[in-house]
């Protein structure tokens, strides 16, 4: 029997996977089976950490706001400030409040004084 030459589809699939893993170290970028495992693991980590990044930034903003508030005794506590913001219907999210707290503390003090009145 004559030898049958295989097609290019499987090779194209493997090279596509290898391009994804070209920056990995050792066998993780050379062996097809470990490349597929590491690709799956990398994609799972990326998906998980996209949600974790949002969580971490929210914690950072809350910490920054709380540090400025407690440092100068504006309204004594973070949760009371946020509660008063909602009661006054001021639509300032935590990201904006943290930026104000870092760049211009006097503005944060003015906002908190307006809320308390």
Image (spheres, rainbow, N blue to C red):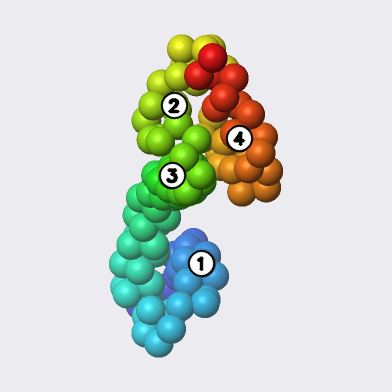
Circle nearer the viewer, 4 or 2: 4
The C terminus, quarter of image:
top right
Within-10-Å neighbours for mark 1: few <14, some 14–19, many 20+: some
Residues 44 and 92: in front is: 92
In x, y percent, where is residue 100?
Answer: 63, 40
The residue lying at 45 percent from left, 31 percent from top is: 75
- Number of the label disc, if any, that sits on residue 71: none
SS at badge 4: helix
In x, y percent, where is residue 74?
Answer: 50, 35
Say if 45 sits above or below 111 in the image: below
Q: What residue sits right under mark 1 in the picture?
A: 20
SS at badge 2: helix
Which of the marked residues, 4 or 2, is nearer the chain's N terminus? 2
Residues 65 and 11: in front is: 65
State yes or no: discs 3 and 2 in contact (Cβ < 8 Å).
no
Within-10-Å neighbours for mark 3: few <14, some 14–19, many 20+: few
Q: What residue sits right under mark 2 in the picture?
A: 82
State yes or no: discs 4 and 2 in contact (Cβ < 8 Å).
no
Q: Is residue 58 visible?
A: no
Say if 22 sits above or below 67 in the image: below
Outermost bottom residue: 26
SS at badge 3: helix
Circle nearer the viewer, 1 or 2: 2
Which of the marked residues, 1 or 4, is nearer the chain's N terminus? 1
Q: What residue sits right under mark 3 in the picture?
A: 70
């Amino acid at each position: 029997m004559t030898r049958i030459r295989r097609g290019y589809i499987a090779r194209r699939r493997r090279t596509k996977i290898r391009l994804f893993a070209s920056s990995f170290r050792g066998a993780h970028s050379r062996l097809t089976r470990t490349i597929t495992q590491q690709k799956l693991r990398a994609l799972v980590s990326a998906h998980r950490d996209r949600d974790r990044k949002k969580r971490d930034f929210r914690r950072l903003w809350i910490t920054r706001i709380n540090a400025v508030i407690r440092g100068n005794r504006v309204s004594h506590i973070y949760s009371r400030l946020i509660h008063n913001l909602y009661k006054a219907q001021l639509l300032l999210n935590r990201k904006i409040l943290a930026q104000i707290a870092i760049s211009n503390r006097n503005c944060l003090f003015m906002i908190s004084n307006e809320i308390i009145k």
